[in-house]
Image (cartoon, coloured by chain):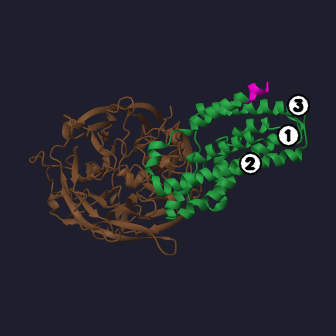
Amino acid sequence: MPLWKPDPTFYPSPRQAVTAPAEKLAYVAAFDRSAEKPDAIAVLDVDETSTSYGRVVGWTDLPYRGDELHHFGWNACSSALCPAAPHPHVERRYLIVPGLRSSRIYVLDTKDDPRAPRVMRTIQPEELAKAGYSRPHTVHCGPEGIYVSNLGGADGADGPGGIALLDHDSFDVLGAWEIDRGPQYFGYDFWWHLTRDVLVTSEWGTPSMIEDGLVGELLLGRKYGHQIHFWDLRKRRHLQTLDLGDQHQMALELRPAHDPTKEYGFVGVVVSVEDLSASVWLWHRDDGGAFTIRKVIEIPAEPADAADLPPILQPFGAVPPLVTDIDLSVDDRYLYVSAWGIGKLLQYDVSDPFAPRLTGEVRLGGIVSRAAHPAAPELALAGGPQMVEVSRDGRRVYITNSLYGAWDDQFYPDGVGAWAAKLDVDLDSGGIAPDPRFFPHGDEFRGLRVHQTRLQGGDASSDSYCFP
Amino acid sequence: MSWLAVATLAGLGAFHGLNPGMGWLFAVAIGLQERSALAVLRSLLPIAAGHALSVFAVAGLVEVLRSVLATRVVAIAGGVVMVGFGLWKALSRRHFAWAGMRLTPWQLTGWSFLMSSVHGAGLMLVPVLVANPPPGVHRDHALHAPSDPGALLWQGLAATTVHTVAMVAVAGAVGLLVYRVLGLEVLRRAWVNLDLVWAVALIGSGAAAVVLTI
């Protein structure tokens, strides 16, 4: 049933969204690497006044096994207020949850019992194949429906990856979004400058390049993705490719400015094959009207004893930072960068996006450092800050520690474990610190690994806005 | 046209103008993007043109049909279409989908035409149009006799003009009020589900048109 007033979690502008109340629940994608148990959505209590704060308070087991849950998103968000087709009386209610390995997509209803969402629809891989795609990844609610990016082609084809469009209401797969994909082949993340009719996509690799682990020859041969693509959101046509240089392997997470009058954004690069550094790049519109890109953050590799390194890194004698996720606060002020290899979460003040300023860092886990959490100082942590999610008000940052099943096994061969942490943010002068009361880990996640977090009511990477 | 008809057409125009989906919201977004109140008003021109085209498509059709059919038949058929369309609006969860915010004035006109059409903006005028006696025909005979198509079309055009002027005046006033005074927070607090109101209005006036004519 449609609502009488707009869904209260929709905000016309990012300036209003930062005034949103604190979230009470967080949804975390959890997967069983062995595919013996079903994957699940774990529900965390993030209400600081609750007695079960920082604990897993609910589970939704999925009906199949081996999905490898990864990223997910909401059926509707603040873009429903956009003036070209306003429909703000729908509900932010359903989580669209893709299985990255199985190519199934689940629709979970969070309304009746937010602590135990109900699986209300399963979209089978054959249905997604109608769009020509498999290995669904990023989900965004947008002007023409629900957009889902994919890494692979359908019916055994390795590529091209691309975006499938799902119906807003029925969740039926409508087809491939692209009308003219130009030179784009690899898929990974996407987002947009909604008021500028621009969509941006990034590149990881095809399923055969990632599903059995990172392939050293492909990496050193510079075969993973290193470009980002700009598209006409309305005409669904490829406009422009920006190449970061093939030494910059794997251009992953895209974080455009939330302010709709701005046309810039950040993309994280996992590793440079020249020096194992990681980097963050800024794209922006130049005076001539074309997009251009430049490196604004570089994080160097940390030297290490070969004896302390997993086999994949021993030849290099260093730990690559491996920037695998970045997240931009809703007010576009702070950029959070996770360096999964060295076990660091970095906070940059990007008020001037061309000149990020490091304002805070937290060390947890890491391939060599194995830094502990203040809540369990004796426990050496595997994995590192990986998926980052920022609350709408920018005061809380949530992180989880798994990257991707097969890759976890290569970089943390003793087991990556499972943990989540919450960091408190000093908004005025910058700075982040782990909350000692918030550290769900180990058995609390039932042996599953944890990936993306989504916050009830929306978060910094869920909503886009049409009004400044 | 009687004063009552003019007032009703203007009232419906005001009602359409009030609806954020019909244009003022788009105008405000463009104004905010360009940081200009003038841009709010400027973008309302193509929006008004699209709305007028959509309304005239229905008004013109109704008047032309009245020149070959008895008004009673047109009224009943129009009423039935309105009730059906209103029921569909009320029961279906479908909503208008549109990608793209950087539009030329022509594209904005097209957008407004489509937006008004899928919301049945013109349909809502049918009861007023058919209640209006054809030019030169006495009210007592109005429901029976076909009459001059040219004169009827002019009447349709006049109705469209009255309606659209009221629509754009209200949309402009609301748009400027939100842009300058109220701010965007009003969207979260005061934006009731006008789709439901429209559906009820269509069903109600469509049914009334049928009942009163029979």
The reply to whether residue A152 is visible in this rendering is yes
Q: Which residue is drawn at 25% across and 60% down?
A: A347
Residue bearing mark 1: B134
Up-down: is B141 above or below B120? above
> Where is residue A464 drawn, in percent x and y?
44, 52
Q: What range of the chain is rendered magenta? A: B209-214
Q: Which three-letter amino acid code belongs to the residue tagged 1? A: Pro
Are discs 3 and 2 less than 8 Å apart at CB? no
Q: Do labels 1 and 2 share a chain?
A: yes
- Chain ID, mark 1: B
**Do the numbered discs 1 and 2 sit on residues whose CB atoms are within 8 Å?**
no
Q: How far apart are marks 1 and 3 (CA)?
A: 11 Å
Q: Colour of chain A?
A: brown
Element carrying mark 1: loop
**Which chain can be seen in green?**
B
Q: What residue type is labelled 2?
A: Thr
